[in-house]
Image (cartoon, grey):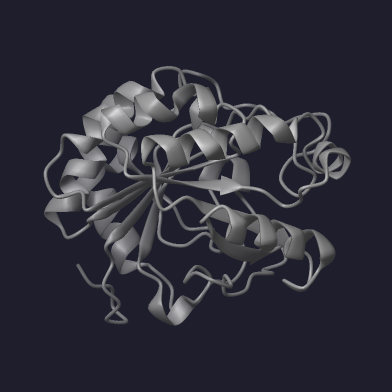
Amino acid sequence: MYDKFNRRINYLRISVTDRCNLRCVYCMPESGIQLIDHREIISFEEIVEVVILSISRGIDKIRITGGEPLVRKGIVDLIRMIAEIPGVKDFGLTTNGINLEKYAQQLKDAGLHRVNVSLDTLDPDKYKEITRLGDIQDVLDGIAEAKKVGLTPVKINCVIKKSSQEPDAVAVAEYCNKNDLQIRYIKQMDLSMGHFSVVEGGEGGDCKICNRLRLTAKGMIKPCLFNNREYSIRELGVEEALNNALYHKPKCGSVNTVGEFYNIGG
């Protein structure tokens, strides 16, 4: 399917939860967040309904995000349900890696193709400072396990402040080169200020070729991360919500004053 700017929309990002087992300084306040009531969180059945209709309209790339998707109860079952839908050509999941060693084989067996793992530094103390809770060894073990079971290519998402030549980013790049991992540098973003840029090593943030829609943890289809528009699949129905999101997809991102990364997916 195409939007009104003739961009082919074939990518759906699905936030399955607003919960996370970390409190990264650029994503969440130290005190935590006001969590969505469990009764409001999108169900697996609703997700599958959206995926089926989206694929019938031309979506062939699916990415599962959060929050942290591996804290969602039954996540392996959801992966299996989506993988069994004909037409999914590229099926990935973005994770902080803390639970990846535990789930990697199950995810692969369920039909997941590959993973992106967040890793901003190799310094254990700095990692704990950034994430407030995390042990970097859990992430490194998870990456190794993902490679072992074939969730490849494993891509590393490295958040930077200004440049990929920052010392931590350089160290992560060296680690990736040594371990046959692909690195993507993502400049720190601000939804409410409209601060975003093109991902170095990827295509995200390049509005002129944006090919994605988003399904949030509350069942809203969003045409753009940096935009307040969203359409409820529960109030409008999946088809009308999808149609509205496609029609109202903006030419370029601006600001988002009603959402957060942890419940939309970055």
Query: What is the quadrant of the N terminus in the image?
Result: bottom left
Report if residue 215 is visible in the image. Answer: yes
Q: Is residue 17 left or right of residue 13?
A: right
Tell me which residue sits at (88%, 39%) in the image: 125
Q: Residue 156, how many percent across, how many down?
A: 57, 53
Figure check: 62 above or below 37: below
Tell me which residue sits at (43%, 73%) in the image: 250
In the rendered image, the residue lying farthest to the front is 178
Q: Residue 210, how many percent across, how many down?
A: 40, 72
Figure check: 170 above or below 83: below
Q: Is residue 247 left or right of residue 116?
A: left
Figure check: 21 above or below 94: above
Picture quadrant of residue 255: bottom right
Observer-nearest of 155 and 225? 155
Q: Residue 177, how many percent across, how many down?
A: 59, 61
Tell me which residue sits at (32%, 82%) in the image: 5
